[in-house]
């Protein structure tokens, strides 16, 4: 749990977002379990948005399917900003 606690504290909005939004908390903790598959992972500084850059496209597809299955109200936006 130490690694999770350390990642959660990197953005001061993360804790409040987790307290105020149960689905955000569940999704953030779900993604933390896959952090070894990410090049970059965190929360935007402007609100309860999570950004992820995947190491492999196959893992991206797999995780997106899981998100769509368990969190149908989550909107996923893809960008080529990180490469």
Image (spheres, rainbow, N blue to C red):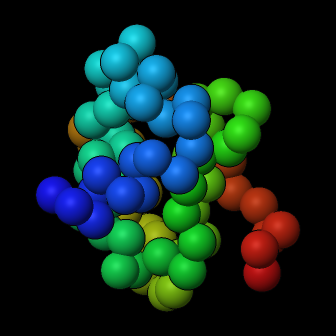
Q: Position of residue 34 (x, y in %)?
A: 31, 69
Q: Position of residue 70 (x, y in %)?
A: 25, 38
Q: Position of residue 45 (x, y in %)?
A: 72, 39
Give the vertical position of 75 relative to 80 (above or below).
above
Identify the residue at horizontal 77%, vertical 61% (top origin).
79
Q: Which one is in front, 52 or 61?
A: 52
* Residue 26 in view: yes
For this orientation, the residue located farthest to the left is 1
Q: Position of residue 48 (x, y in %)?
A: 58, 30
Identify the residue at horizontal 39%, vertical 80% (top origin).
37
Q: Which one is in front, 55 or 60?
A: 55
Q: Is residue 23 left or right of residue 44?
A: left
Q: Is residue 14 left or right of residue 11?
A: left
Give the vertical position of 1 relative to 80 (above or below).
above
* Residue 75 in view: no
Q: Is residue 60 left or right of residue 31?
A: right
């Amino acid at each position: 749990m130490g690694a999770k606690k350390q990642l959660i504290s990197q953005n001061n909005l993360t804790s409040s977002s987790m307290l105020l939004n149960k689905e955000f908390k569940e999704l953030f903790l779900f993604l933390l379990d896959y952090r070894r598959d990410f090049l970059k992972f965190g929360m935007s500084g402007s609100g309860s948005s999570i950004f992820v850059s995947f190491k492999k496209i196959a893992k991206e597809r797999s995780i997106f399917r899981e998100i769509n299955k368990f969190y149908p109200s989550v909107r996923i936006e893809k960008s080529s900003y990180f490469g």
